[in-house]
Structure formats: C-alpha cells, structure tokens
Image (cartoon, rainbow, N blue to C red):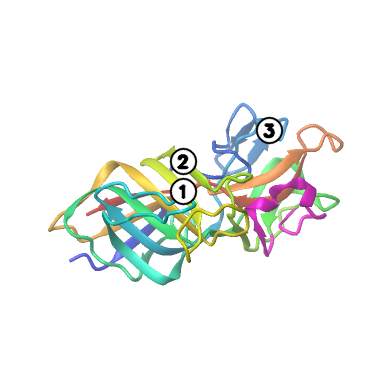
C-alpha cells in the first residue's frame, strides 16, 4: 500500500510566473550564470531574462490531487470543478514545504489514490512564497535607492505584495533586499502573489517541463477568481502531464518533484547615472516553479 509521499525539490527546467516578467534563464545575449552561480548582466533590464535558484523557497500546500479528466478552472462567478480528481494530500490547515534545491522530505495527510491513469493534476496552495537567497554578480549592484552597493545581493526579513512592483510606490532604501559585499547574510523575504500582472489574476496554460500549467488567484471562502489586487489568499493550479501518471496495484511510492532552479527573480533596472551595466535592485522575489509526478 502507498502510505507515504516523497517531495523532492529538483533542479529542472521550467517557466511560470515572475514579478520581473522574466520567464527565461540566465543564459542569453544579455545575461549569463557561470558554473559557480555568478551572474553577469548586460544592458537595459527590459532585455534581460534571468531567474535563478534561491537558497530556500517555502510554500504552504492545502490540497494536491490526480485527475482522470481536466479540472474546470474557476471564474469570477463560479468555483473550480475537481469532481474527476482523487486527493493525495488534504491538509485543511496547510502544511509548509521548504523546497531548498536537492532536499527530500515526507509530507503528511497523504492518501493513496485508486489504481488508474491520471493525465491531469491540481494543487491548491497559499499564494505566498517565503524566499531566502543570496546571489553574486560580476556587475556592481546598488540597493535601491541610496543604499549600499557591491557584487552581492541578498533577501531581507520582510513581506510585500507582488502588486507593489509599481516603482512609484517603492521606498528608499529598499526594505526587501540589500546589496553589498560577500559578508552579507540572507534572511527570509515573504512575497504575496496577489496578481500576475496589473489586473491579471489568471495565467496560462503555459508550457512547463512536464506538460502545461495554468494558475488562478482565488479566495478560500468563495473559490472564485479575484478581481482586484490584495484580495486573493489561495493559488489554484492545474497541470496537464506530458506522460500520464499510472497508479497500479504494485505502486508503493508517489514522488512529486518541484523544479526550483528558477524560483527567484529580481525587480531591478539599469542605472546609467552610476555607469553602464550597473543596476538598482529593489527585491529578489518569486520566480517560476512547476511540478512533475511519478509512481513507483
């Protein structure tokens, strides 16, 4: 009998939402990351696509399920329909999962799904992401604005909404990140994903490593898509798997892999008053992640 579930944070290729609107990799004409994880940026930030692995990336999961047919996504008037799905995780109070790259852990509140073929899955989670990250750059990076400068930037102990990305509302120096020398120590920054873009609360489906993924920002109370920023408290995601998950009588281990190698991104811009290829940094925030599932 399957009586436990293993969560593995893996370094996989993926794309999802990003505050910096950068759904690429640090590997292109204007960005690169070497084998030691040191990033080089060139030119205007609008031409840079760079997401990277955080040191820690914590989410809160309420439900995860496998589905024989595609769940119906929520709308602004109707909640989602998951009647074709079998819950494998059901945590009404939520359980916290730290997706530090390369870690492995066992989750609670797990139920073995019936033997079947499941081409789809869904996850219901809190729309907040606790991030701890410190990155090194070849560039000179400046704490926005009038803060310290150096070749490293790291997260501070703070909380903010993704809708706070409007630069007109930024405070100085940034309370979310600090740049400076190698001795800086990262703390946990919590980002609340309350919109994907301005007045955008539905995303996808978009291509990810193991199929396609869609996401909707909803409330737990109504289960419907929100219509304003700073009102969502849940993220409902549906994934269509490239290879359906097969649960057979001999299945004993269910493994979910979270790709987090691009789970952080920056809010930043080039500051030519400081010099070419120097950047003002306001935050290291949430980047993309996705899941893949397998049964042994």
* Residue 28 picture quarter: top right
Q: Are marks 1 and 2 in contact (CB under 8 Å)?
A: yes
Give the number of the mark in front: 3 or 2.
Answer: 2
Q: In the displayed structure, would residue 11 be above or below residue 111?
A: above
Q: What residue occupies the far top of the structure in this picture?
A: 29
Mark number, residue 215: 1
Q: Residue at x 72, y 43 (%)?
A: 268
Nearest the camera: 104 or 157?
Answer: 157
For numbered disc 1, what is the local secondary structure? strand
According to the picture, the residue beneath numbered tag 2 turns out to be 204
The percent coordinates of residue 67 (x first, y second) are: 27, 52
> Left of 270 or right of it: where is 241?
left
For numbered disc 3, what is the local secondary structure? helix
Nearest the camera: 210 or 221?
Answer: 221
Q: What residue occupies the far left of the structure in this picture?
A: 249
According to the picture, the residue beneath numbered tag 3 turns out to be 46
Among the two numbered marks 1 and 3 on one chain, the one whose residue lies closer to the N terminus? 3
Distance between the Cα atoms at labels 3 and 2? Answer: 22 Å
Q: Residue at x 65, y 60 (%)?
A: 186
Nearest the camera: 156 or 90?
Answer: 90
Residues in magenta? Answer: 156-178
Is residue 291 one of those drawn in magenta?
A: no
Is residue 160 one of those drawn in magenta?
A: yes
Among the two numbered marks 3 and 2 on one chain, the one whose residue lies closer to the N terminus? 3
Q: Quadrant of the N terminus?
A: bottom left
* Mark 2 Cα-neighbour bin, 10 Å: few <14, some 14–19, many ≥20: some
Q: Residue at x 24, y 60 (%)?
A: 253
Nearest the camera: 184 or 108?
Answer: 108
* Residue 209 picture quarter: top left
């Amino acid at each position: 009998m399957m009586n436990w579930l293993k969560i593995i944070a893996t370094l996989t290729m993926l794309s999802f939402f990003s505050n910096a609107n950068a759904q690429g990799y640090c590997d292109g004409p204007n960005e690169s990351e070497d084998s030691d994880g040191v990033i080089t940026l060139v030119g205007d930030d609008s031409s840079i696509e760079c997401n990277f692995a955080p040191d820690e990336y914590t989410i809160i999961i309420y439900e995860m399920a496998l589905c024989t047919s595609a769940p119906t996504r929520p709308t602004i008037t109707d909640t989602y329909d998951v009647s074709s799905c079998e819950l494998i995780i059901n945590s009404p109070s939520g359980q916290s999962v730290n997706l530090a790259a390369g870690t492995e852990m066992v989750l609670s509140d797990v139920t073995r799904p019936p033997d079947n073929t499941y081409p789809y899955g869904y996850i219901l989670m809190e729309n907040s992401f606790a991030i701890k990250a410190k990155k090194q750059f070849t560039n000179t990076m400046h704490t926005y604005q009038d803060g310290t400068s150096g070749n490293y930037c790291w997260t501070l102990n703070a909380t903010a909404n993704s809708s706070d990305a409007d630069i007109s509302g930024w405070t100085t120096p940034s309370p979310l990140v600090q740049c400076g020398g190698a001795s800086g120590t990262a703390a946990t920054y919590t980002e609340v994903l309350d919109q994907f873009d301005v007045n955008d609360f539905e995303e996808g489906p978009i291509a990810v490593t193991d199929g396609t993924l869609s996401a909707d920002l909803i409330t737990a109370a109504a289960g419907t898509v929100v219509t304003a920023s700073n009102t969502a408290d849940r993220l409902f995601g549906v994934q269509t798997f490239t290879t359906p998950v097969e649960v057979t009588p001999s299945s004993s281990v269910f493994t979910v892999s979270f790709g987090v190698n691009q789970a952080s991104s920056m809010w930043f811009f080039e500051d030519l008053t400081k010099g070419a290829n120097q950047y003002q940094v306001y935050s290291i925030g949430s980047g993309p992640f996705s899941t893949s599932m397998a049964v042994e």
